[in-house]
Image (cartoon, helix red, strand yellow):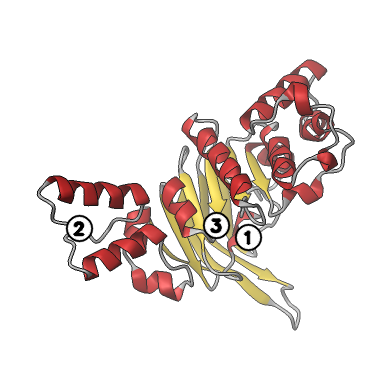
């Protein structure tokens, strides 16, 4: 399922003295099966943009199309769109409210009018995706869980709708390293297993480097650059202007080259740098 933004602009408090243009003539296409990282400093428009992808916000100008259909057109069923495009906000655990984990995850499927059997099957599948045992946690209060577990329950509530596209706004914000790794591993597995196209807002270039197939860099409400991670990370000037920097492995690569080590300059993952150094060592101890 493809998503296309055509000349999308959005103004908060339009027509008032407090009007602010958050998005400015955005043109962007996300193809089925991609893992796209949406990056930029705070206030660049990332969160505003993702809220357009399932119709929570409607553009002041332009169109948002899903499989060629304008989701803000007349007679479009927004509920159907939101079942296709699942949006996970920052700190989604703040939206948990039911007395048990299973009931919270089942909330969306119930509103879809599904049978009790189908609802339970979806809850079980969603809990399996987020690595929470149904038998152990289904009847536990979500408020008795750790922060990372609560985050996974909240994500499972979106997954139970079985969206074709999963949009995550800073999914690891506020988590400790273990919780962060669990969430990122879960998202990676979802994408690899073909369960959803992933669109992830992130400030962590190390996370982006290890997960995304394409990056979209935003500045001042505009798309400043889009391309593969390698293409974007090579544009050091842009990354500095966007306040993002580059992954730690890319910085290490630069330092090694400055020290005279003849390794390629476009490496950006730890594995790539490791392999390049090992290759040089096998070729004759050049490192």
Cα gap from disc 1 to disc 3, whole angstroms: 10 Å
**In the image, farthest residue toward the front:** 285
Q: Mark 1 vs mark 3: give the one in front.
A: 3
183 or 125, which lies in front?
183
Q: Secondary structure at mark 2?
A: loop
Q: Is residue 91 or residue 83 the one in the foreground?
A: 91
Other-residue count near label 3 (Cα within 10 Å), few / some / many at <14 / 14–19 / ≥20: many
Give percent across and percent down for residue 137: 78, 29
Where is 171 relative to 18, above or below?
above
The residue labelled by disc 3 is 202
Using a 10 Å C-alpha cutoff, classify the residue at mark 2 as few (fewer than 14 neighbours), some (14 to 19) or many (20 or more).
Answer: some
Above-or-below relation of 16 to 111? below
Residue 47 disc label: 1
10 Å neighbourhood of mark 1: few (<14), some, or many (≥20)?
Answer: some
Question: Which residue is drawn at the image coordinates 80% and 19% (left, top)?
Answer: 115
Q: Residue at x 51, y 50 (%)?
A: 4
- Identified at 70% across, 25% down, the residue is 133
Q: Is residue 139 left or right of residue 39?
A: right
Which type of secondary structure does the marked residue at label 3 adopt? Answer: loop
The quarter in which the C terminus is drawn is bottom left
Task: Locate residue 171 relative to residue 189 in the image: left or right.
Answer: right
User: Closer to the N terminus: mark 1 or mark 3?
Assistant: 1
């Amino acid at each position: 399922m493809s998503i296309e933004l055509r000349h999308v602009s959005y103004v908060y408090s339009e027509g008032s003295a407090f009007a602010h243009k958050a998005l400015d003539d955005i043109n962007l296409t996300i193809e089925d099966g991609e893992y796209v990282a949406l990056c930029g400093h705070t206030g660049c428009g990332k969160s505003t943009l993702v809220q357009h992808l399932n119709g929570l916000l409607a553009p002041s100008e332009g169109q948002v199309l899903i499989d060629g259909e304008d989701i803000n057109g007349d007679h479009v069923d927004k509920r159907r769109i939101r079942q296709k495009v699942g949006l996970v906000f920052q700190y989604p655990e703040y939206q948990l409210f039911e007395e048990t984990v299973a009931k919270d995850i089942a909330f969306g499927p119930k509103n879809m009018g599904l049978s009790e059997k189908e609802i339970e099957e979806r809850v079980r599948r969603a809990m399996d995706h987020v690595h929470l045992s149904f038998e152990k946690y289904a009847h536990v209060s979500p408020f008795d869980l750790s922060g990372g577990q609560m985050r996974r329950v909240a994500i499972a509530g979106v997954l139970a709708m079985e969206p074709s596209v999963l949009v995550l706004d800073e999914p690891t914000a506020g988590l400790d390293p273990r919780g962060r790794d669990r969430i990122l591993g879960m998202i990676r597995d979802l994408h690899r297993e073909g369960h959803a196209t992933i669109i992830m807002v992130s400030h962590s270039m190390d996370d982006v480097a290890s997960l995304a197939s394409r990056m979209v860099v935003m500045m001042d409400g505009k798309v400043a650059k889009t391309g593969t991670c390698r293409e974007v990370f090579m544009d050091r000037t842009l990354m500095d202007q966007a306040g993002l920097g580059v992954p730690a492995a890319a910085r290490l690569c630069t330092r090694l080259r400055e020290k005279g080590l003849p390794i390629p300059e476009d490496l950006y993952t730890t594995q790539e740098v490791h392999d390049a150094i090992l290759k040089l060592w096998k070729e004759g101890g050049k490192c």
